[in-house]
Amino acid sequence: MEPQKFQDTFKRIEAEIRKVIVGHDDAIRKVLIAFFAGGHVLLEGVPGLGKTLLVKAFSAAIGMSFKRIQFTPDLMPSDIVGTEVLAESGGRREFQFKKGPVFAHVVLADEINRATPKTQSAVLEAMEEKQVTVFGESHLLESPFMVMATQNPIELEGTYPLPEAQLDRFFFKLLVTSPTQVELREILKRTTGTESGETNRVLSGDGGQHINDMKQLLRQVLIAPPIEDYVVRLVHGTQPAAQNGSVAPASVRNYLRFGSSPRGAQSIILGAKGNALAEGRVHVSYEDVEKVLYPALRHRIILNFQAEAENVSADQIIAEVVKQVPRT
Amino acid sequence: MEALKEKSERGAPEQVILGLVTKLTHHALWDALLAILPPVAAVLYCLLYLFLNLWISPVTTLVLGCAALAVGALAIARRYRPNIPSAHLAAHLIDDRAAAEDRFLTLATLQPSPTAAFLVSRLRAEAVGLHGHIAIKREFPYRIKRHVYASLLISLAAALLFQLLLPLAHSTLHPQPAHELLRELAQRMAQRPNLRETARSLHNLSAKLEDPKVPMQEQRNLAQEERKKIDEQQKKQTQKQDRDLLNQAAGTLQGIEQQSGGAERKKDQDSGAGGIQSNLPQQGQGEGKQSQGSGGDSKGELDAQLNNEMQRGKMAQGNPRESGAEKNPGDQSGGTSNQPDPNNAGKDQSKERPGKTEGSRDEGTGRGKVSAEIPQGTPPAERFYKPGEGGAQGIKGAGYVTVQLPEELAAEGKGGGQKRDSKGGKALSSQVPVSNVPLPKHVPDAPAEKQQMPLEYRGIIR
């Protein structure tokens, strides 16, 4: 696939999503980057900001199958991955696998932190291995496959915070923020009148193949070794314990329990490549890295009690690391 | 860098990067040269200066110069090598100037990969379009860094200080000999019509001062005489310049006197000359008040008392010249005493020393300042009890002085004095009275002018 074609497709999908989503340009772009990089996205924001709508619009734009799972405390793993049911066919009774909602190209795990850890972990294998195992039998998921989970940061009563292992499996964690006045006016205009935007399908025909080609191209994007080194230094910079003679910034030492895993570096590089292609370039620049740094790392660095007590956010720590780590 | 050279054959962007690397390498070399050369030049200048002033030999100059050059070369290399720019850095700079969004960096550092060849081609094409926007020569001119100025200024200041302070230090450490100073003054005086005679006299004096055969004491005397003449002439002179010259000459001569006096004192101290202890009875009360004299490294004590033998002129070893020569030849200035001690008299007394050494002949003339201490009344010889006069034998109302001797002599005086006395009949003994009392004429081998004690002691003895 030609880079130009990638950019065109990318822009068209963006445009289609923007028909129904006002604002959140950065979130839309990051969702698309994560999708073409083969990752999953965790959307965090208070209710009513359009998280679910964003996912719906996205799936509609790419024309892929979409399933929504509303996570509740009584949700069982089998409700997600499916289960064996006794079915009668041709006078014979046999167990047949009944696919769960996870068998879709785009899965919306709405309010994922409301389900029990047991149910949450059922999504783990699906996210990482792109397959589920039921009664000892593995079932491949759709390709492309993407989980988009949402969580509410304020209603924490009766919720089960996602374990670090599961958080690490999300390519990006995107913060959905409140719209600005202008955006809110536009939202009101679109939703309270007679006119309503409708997302059109961008990819026609074999959309899956097209998306796979785009994903392949994204991985071929050129990245200079010094930029890779920069990413390595950044990820190392989030480690509270000194490594290889380097000393972590004071904020990292004071407020972090654990730094980013190697998955964080992978996410940064792939995200930067996606961003470069989206901007019409075939090589990664330092700016690309810094644009995807926050969503790639903010859920991978584990804050300690002191940070929570002092209301220090992960983004503040990352900003400090960026300040401390030189580009060259 | 080699990879970049290979790549540069393929496309222009790599050539631009290579060109900038070369340019920045030259910049780094200039930086190192300009920072290190000034101190090296300053060191070489100082060496040359020392060499031209004959303070160091040519070989030393050559060796030190080579060492300075070697150290400089080493410093240049050390400073230059870390500053050699990498292709990465050069590409980064071009990206910044051309707003190339790291295209040049990627091209310069990317490992060739066949799978993404079409992407590299596209990237190179983009870079070619961008590198036309920058001109390496214009964008990256050589600018002299601040540390170069600092190095230059510090080196210059160091060299100037060296040139200014070294002669000063040299003259302080190695002052110009007095005779040379006098000769210079004489030359200057010779140009003044009124001072030609003085100039000639000073010239002669400088010749004598230069002559090592002339004893120091004589030099001092000559200087003193000359100074007196100059003092008198100075009073007569009306012209300021002449007065100034004479003033300078007087000052120089005074310095010579002090210098020679000091040298003699030092000589005395080095030879272990002791001080003098006075054990003078307080106005006939029969008890001596001791004052501890000190001087030299060794201390000696010799109780000198006048006895009947002395009165009779029977001084077994009591030749004052002989004993004095062993103790304090001609000068006791090395000692200190709480008593009115001539050794504490300082410079003024040292100036008067020629008078003392000449003995009683100069008594009336040569010691104006201490004349109050010198008995002016009865001649010394008459102070002895004459035969038939009642009273004890010896000097009328005589006290005694204790002469502090060098340690060696004192030891001999205490321990082996008697033995030596019996053997050679010459050695000193603690029994031997030693004083500065002028001996009567009839005492053989005791001419008054050869007495060894300063005349001031007579006052003490009295």
Image: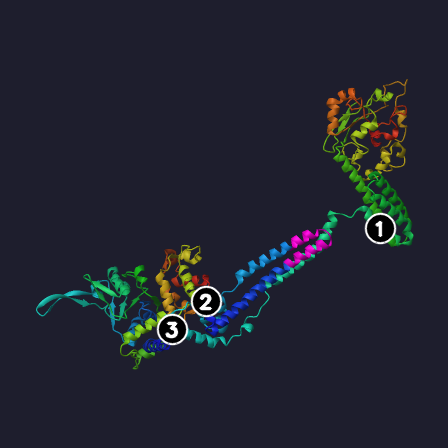
Alpha carbons under labels 2 and 1: distance apart: 79 Å
**Kind of residue at badge 3:** Leu
Q: Which residue is denoted by mark 1 in the rendering?
A: B185
Residue A146 covered by magenta stretch: no
**Kind of residue at badge 1:** Leu
Output the chain of dot 2: B
Alpha carbons under labels 3 and 1: distance apart: 94 Å
Q: Please, which residue is most extreme toward the bottom here?
A: A194
Residue A101 seen from this side = yes
Above or below, A49 against B353 in this view is below
Q: Which residue is denoted by mark 3 in the rendering?
A: A277
Label 3 with label 1: CB-CB less than 8 Å: no
Mark 3 falls on what kind of element?
Answer: helix
Label 3 with label 2: CB-CB less than 8 Å: no
Taking the image as shown, residue B390 lies to the left or right of residue A291, namely right
Q: Hey, which quadrant is residue A139 in on the image?
A: bottom left
Could you say which disc has been placed on residue B218 in the image?
none
Q: Which residue is denoted by mark 2 in the rendering?
A: B3
Residue A191 rendering spot, x and y as whole percentages: 31, 78
Depth-wise, is mark 3 or mark 2 nearer the camera? 2
Q: Hey, which quadrant is residue A33 in on the image?
A: bottom left
Taking the image as shown, residue A106 lies to the left or right of residue A228, namely left
Depth-wise, is mark 2 or mark 1 nearer the camera? 2
Label 2 with label 1: CB-CB less than 8 Å: no
Answer few, some or many: residues within 10 Å of disc 3's Cα (few below 14, many 20 plus, some between 14 and 19): many
Residue B161 seen from this side = no
* Magenta residue span: B40-65
Please tell me which residue lies in front, B376 or B243: B243
